[in-house]
Amino acid sequence: MRQQKAARPTGTRPLKVGETLRHTLSQILQRGEVHDPALARHNVTISEVRMSPDLRHATVFCAPLGGQGAEEMLKDLRRCQPLLRTEVAHAVKLRYAPELHFHLDTSYDYAESISNLLNGDPIIASDLKKAREIK
């Protein structure tokens, strides 16, 4: 007899768990529940958490508030990953504590570069100004 594989979560479950983890990580970092002086120096913004379908891995997109010291912040977060994982496991009841993978969120920089491109071109800037006047 063949052993059946565990069903993979589909639908909105990974999205809901990811959003719960985002809130939880933000609260843990804001309250300073991980007693690490190097990590306490950073004001971290957690913008998104993407869960794997089996809910065992969480990709955490973060950025430093103000945009300065991103590499140092990532290094400190990755070093404190086991402590953060333990805190998340206590706060969020899941079958398995997800492995946290920290990545720098570059979406803010990308949006700013698009905005600069749009506002830098005089033709596009005049079109945007006309569109605002029509509203």
Image: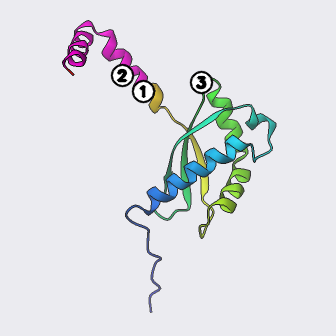
SS class of the residue under badge 2?
Answer: helix
Quadrant in the picture for residue 131? top left
The amino acid at mark 2 is Ile
Q: Residue at x 75, y 47 (%)?
A: 33
* N-terminal label among 3 and 1: 3
Instruction: Report which residue position mark 1 lands on.
Output: 110
- Tell me, yes or no, whether the highlighted magenta stretch contains residue 127: yes
Asked which quadrant contains residue 95, the reply is: bottom right
Counting residues from the start of the chain, the first of labels 2 and 3 encountered is 3
Dominant secondary-structure state across the stretch colored magenta: helix
Q: Can residue 51 be found in the magenta stretch?
A: no
Question: Is label 1 in a helix, a strand or a loop?
Answer: helix
Residue 107 to residue 95: above or below: above
Range drawn in magenta? 111-134
Taking depth in this image into account, of 20 and 10 the one nearest to the observer is 20
Residue 53, picture quadrant = bottom left
Q: Is 39 positioned to the left or the right of 22 in the image?
A: right
On the rendered structure, is 70 left or right of 59? right
- Reading the image, the residue beneath label 2 is 114
For image coordinates 69% across by 32% down, the residue present is 42
Q: CA distance from mark 1 to mark 2?
A: 6 Å
Judge left or right: residue 1 versus residue 75: left
Numbered tag placed on residue 66 in the rendering? 3
Q: Secondary structure at mark 3?
A: loop
